[in-house]
Image (cartoon, rainbow, N blue to C red):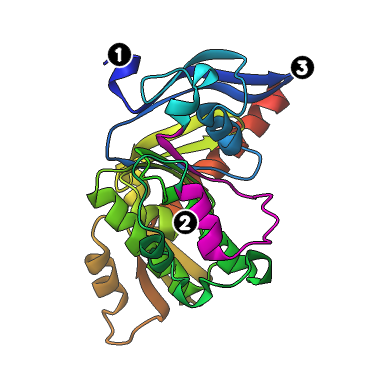
């Protein structure tokens, strides 16, 4: 596959600041209609990657293509094909929700209906409210609404549900499901691993500026990372065992007819796998430092 075959494609992407490498050889592709989660700790390089792909930040080296265009050279027509929800916005908020969306809709040839978008982000009751009078979570919904008003081919979502209550998050998930069904390609960053697991087709995990794993949501980390864990308490304290046959382990533990204290079977989630990969990467870096 060549770099132009994917909606987003990067090869050996690097961004350095003097001796510090914010990105160090990152490569991945995102196919049309796919939702791809870019995950990692704070400072790992996620936002730097997204800003390069959005055309807001120059790369030091490597190749990048977004909708067939080098983002460093993307013009107004290219930007109109993107939807962007940043972590933070600088909107003054001295207009109503409806006025703000109506204003932005005029920049696009075929925008979504303003009322449709307001309903999609759950702000019908706040349509005539000044944005500066909204709560933080409600303002975040306005950010999302602005990102989708232009029917983007590619939607960047950088921590989109920060400040959302659980009900609003579920409503947002429904909205993303609708966008996926319409064929929108989505690049998502989030610290909510359940959100990434629910919404995404694939994920890449970035740490220390390097991509440490990439794959389908239910395959990332490899088969060994998905082995169930049986946990229980006995006279020697907390016990746990990874096994492909958790039922057999439980049966053995209950051979005398009584259930051990705290008995549970845990099937590792994306969050469990993610934490394991990040911790293993940090340990490997520490070992490397000690050998220098």
Q: Residue at x 45, y 49 (%)?
A: 105
The magenta span reads 80-105
Disc nearer the start of the sequence (2/1): 1
Circle 3 sits on which residue?
A: 18
Q: Is residue 236 above or below residue 242?
A: below
Comparing labels 2 and 1, the label whose residue is closer to the camera: 2
Circle 2 sits on which residue?
A: 145
Comparing labels 1 and 3, the label whose residue is closer to the camera: 1
**Callout 3 secondary element:** loop
Would you say residue 161 sits in the magenta stretch?
A: no
Q: Residue at x 52, y 51 (%)?
A: 103
Disc nearer the start of the sequence (2/3): 3
CB contact under 8 Å: marks 2 and 3? no
Circle 1 sits on which residue?
A: 2
Instruction: Compare residues 126 and 2 and report the one nearer the observer.
Output: 126
Give the position of the C terminus as an image quadrant.
Answer: top right
């Amino acid at each position: 596959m060549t770099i132009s075959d994917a909606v987003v494609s990067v090869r050996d992407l690097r961004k350095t600041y003097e001796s510090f490498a914010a990105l160090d050889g990152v490569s991945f592709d995102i196919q049309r209609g796919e939702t791809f989660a870019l995950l990692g700790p704070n400072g790992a390089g996620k936002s730097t990657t997204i800003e390069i792909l959005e055309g807001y930040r120059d790369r030091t080296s490597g190749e990048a293509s977004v909708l067939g265009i080098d983002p460093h050279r993307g013009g107004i027509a290219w930007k109109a094909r993107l939807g962007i929800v940043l972590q933070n916005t600088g909107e003054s908020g001295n207009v109503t929700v409806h006025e703000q969306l109506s204003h932005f809709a005029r920049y696009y040839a075929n925008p979504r209906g303003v009322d449709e978008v307001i309903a999609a982000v759950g702000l019908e009751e706040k349509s005539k409210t000044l944005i500066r009078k909204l709560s933080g979570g409600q303002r975040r919904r306005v950010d999302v609404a602005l990102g989708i008003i232009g029917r983007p081919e590619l939607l960047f979502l950088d921590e989109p549900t920060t400040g959302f209550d659980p009900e609003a998050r579920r409503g947002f998930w429904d909205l993303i499901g609708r966008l996926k069904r319409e064929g929108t390609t989505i690049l998502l960053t989030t610290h909510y691993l359940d959100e990434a697991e629910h919404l995404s087709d694939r994920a890449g995990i970035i740490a220390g500026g390097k991509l440490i794993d990439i794959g389908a949501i239910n395959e990332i980390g490899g088969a060994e990372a998905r082995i169930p864990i049986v946990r229980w308490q006995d006279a020697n304290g907390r016990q746990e065992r990874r096994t492909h046959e958790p039922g057999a382990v439980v049966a053995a533990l209950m051979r005398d007819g009584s259930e051990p204290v705290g008995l549970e079977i845990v099937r590792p989630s994306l969050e469990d796998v993610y934490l394991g990969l990040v911790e293993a990467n940090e340990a490997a870096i520490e070992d490397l430092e000690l050998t220098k």
